[in-house]
Amino acid sequence: MAKLSSINKNERRRKLVKKYAGQYAKLKAIANDESKDDTERLIARLKMAELPRNANPTRVRNRCELTGRSRGFYRKFRLSRIMLRELGNKGLIPGLTKSSW
């Protein structure tokens, strides 16, 4: 189980990303649009820099929903490899079967 502070910090980041998502996307589109002149693009980049650092989507870490573990994360199930195996063996994940050969 991950530290509770790490899990909470990541949740705060998720909320900030959600809050600033529209503004961030709009500024990023302007900054990457090569048909605009350079000063307008630079102003958009400067405004992006004024947003909170944790509003950047790359700062959010994928974590297991049950344990908070950040490594060995399966996006499809939003679980770590350990919890995926445990729940799969118990038959709690539909369509997942343990392979054997």
Image (cartoon, rainbow, N blue to C red):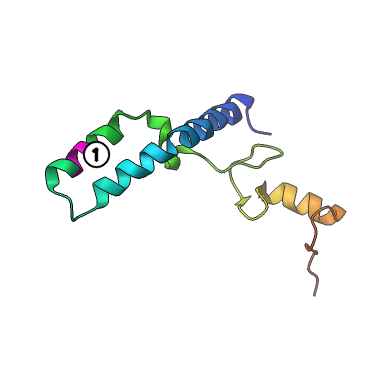
Measured from the top left, where is residue 71 in percent x and y?
A: 59, 45
Residue 98, picture quadrant: bottom right
What residue lies at 61% left-to-right and 49% top-to-bottom? Answer: 73
In this image, 90 relative to 49: left or right? right
Q: Considering only vertical position in the picture, is 96 above or below 51? A: below
The image shows residue 97, relative to residue 74, as above or below, that is: below
Compared with residue 15, is residue 27 higher up or lower down, i.e. above or below?
below
* Magenta-drawn stretch contains 15: no
Residue 32 image point, x, y percent: 26, 51
Quarter placement of the N terminus: top right
At label 1, the amino acid type is: Arg
Q: Which residues are magenta?
A: 41-45
Secondary structure mostly seen in magenta is: helix
> Residue 68: percent from the left, percent from the top?
65, 37
The residue that label 1 is drawn on is: 45
Percent across and percent down for residue 80 are: 66, 47
Q: Nearer the viewer, residue 14 or 40?
A: 40
Left or right relative to 47: residue 59: right
Circle 1 Cα neighbour tier, 10 Å, few/some/many (<14 / 14–19 / ≥20): some
> Image point 71% across, 39% down: which residue?
66
